[in-house]
Structures are given as structure tokens and as C-alpha cells.
Image (cartoon, rainbow, N blue to C red):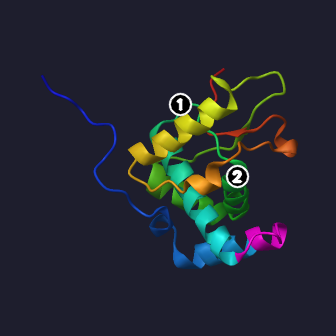
Amino acid sequence: MTIALERPVGTTDPTTLVEPKVISQLVRRITTDHPEINDDTARRIVGQAAAFIAASGQRPSRGLVPSELVDYGWHAFILHTVDYADFCERVAGRFVHHVPTDEDEQTPGGAAAARERTMAAIAAAGYAVDAELWQSSADCNQCHAGCHDSPKSG
């Protein structure tokens, strides 16, 4: 009998996925848009956003969702379209679209289950999870009920 482990041995700091110049740009964008966030926390947010995008690329139909803080990093990254597209292709093998949910759509299992599923997918992909940044699910008012990874079937 063969047992396959979903979680790889060891974890990678997800900030190593992003070019230092891009990290600096994203940190600056996050701290400008959210002055209550300091540079160190913004850097951690960028790392978790990178891990979220990478995990989303590996598990496109799992309904992964960012936390509120990680969503700040994802939104900042998307604004840098060239860097974001390059990152997605390099790390996920495809462009990871930002797909908002409609108001009447529900996340399978609810927000807490989606958050847990997302953190598990990040860990299974081999990236360190910064649990402190995953306390609450994203609720993007410009995105209706929340933000999800792609693709969206239908």
C-alpha cells in the first residue's frame, strides 16, 4: 500500500517568489492605501498574497479565498499588471484571475471553511502560512461578497 502525503516536507518563505523590486512597490502601495499597516506587516501580506496566488494556480477549482489582509496584497499586485502577469505565468503556469462572487453566491462550506481550505492548500503547496494574517475572510465591497481565484465555471 502506498501513502501519498499531500503536504511537502519543509516550507518555503513565499516572499522568495517575488522579485525584491516588486516587493518594495507592493509594500509601498499597501502602506499608502492602508496607512494603519506598517512596512513589516505589508511585506508579510505580500508574501501571503504570493502564496495564495501560487496555490490558486495549482488548485484552480478548489474555491480558494484570501483573507482580508491578504486581499490587500492581491489587489496591490493586480494593479502592477505586467509584474502580476509575469508572476502568475512563472509561479502558477497561467494567469490567476480575480473573480468576484455575486451577492447570492455562497462559498462552499462558508467563509471559515474556505479560509481553512485556502491555508491548507498554501501549506500543501509548500509555502509557509502566516496564520496571523488569515484571521478574517476578505469582504471586498467593490467585489460584492468577496474575492476568489479563477477559473469560474459557467
| Left or right: 123 as drawn, with respect to 143 | left
Percent coordinates x, y for residue 57 in the rendering: 50, 43
Q: Earlier in the sequence, mark 1 or mark 2?
A: 1
Q: Say whether residue 31 is magenta.
A: yes
| Left or right: 59 as drawn, with respect to 109 | left
- Quick check: 106 above or below 122? above
Amino acid under disc 1: Arg
Q: Quadrant of residue 7?
A: top left
Q: Residue at x 53, y 29 (%)?
A: 61
Neighbour tally class for label 1: few under 14, some 14-19, many 20 plus, Cα within 10 Å: some
Q: Which residue is mark 2?
A: 71
Nearer to the camera, 37 or 23: 37
- Whether residue 151 is visible to the viewer of this picture, yes or no, is no
Which residue is situated farthest in the right direction here? 141
Q: Say whether residue 128 is magenta.
A: no
Q: Split into 4 quadrants, where in the image is the N terminus?
A: top left
The residue range painted magenta reads 30-38
Which residue is situated farthest in the left direction here? 1
Nearer to the camera, 120 or 85: 120
Q: Which residue is mark 1?
A: 62
- Whether residue 82 is visible to the viewer of this picture, yes or no, is yes
Percent coordinates x, y for residue 79 in the rendering: 73, 61
Percent coordinates x, y for residue 53 in the rendering: 55, 50
Amino acid under disc 2: Asp
Badge 1 element:
loop
Q: Quadrant of residue 86?
A: bottom right
- Quick check: 35 above or below 96? below
The reply to whether discs 1 and 2 touch (Cβ–Cβ < 8 Å) is no
Q: Residue at x 49, y 50 (%)?
A: 54
Percent coordinates x, y for residue 126 in the rendering: 38, 51
Neighbour tally class for label 2: few under 14, some 14-19, many 20 plus, Cα within 10 Å: many
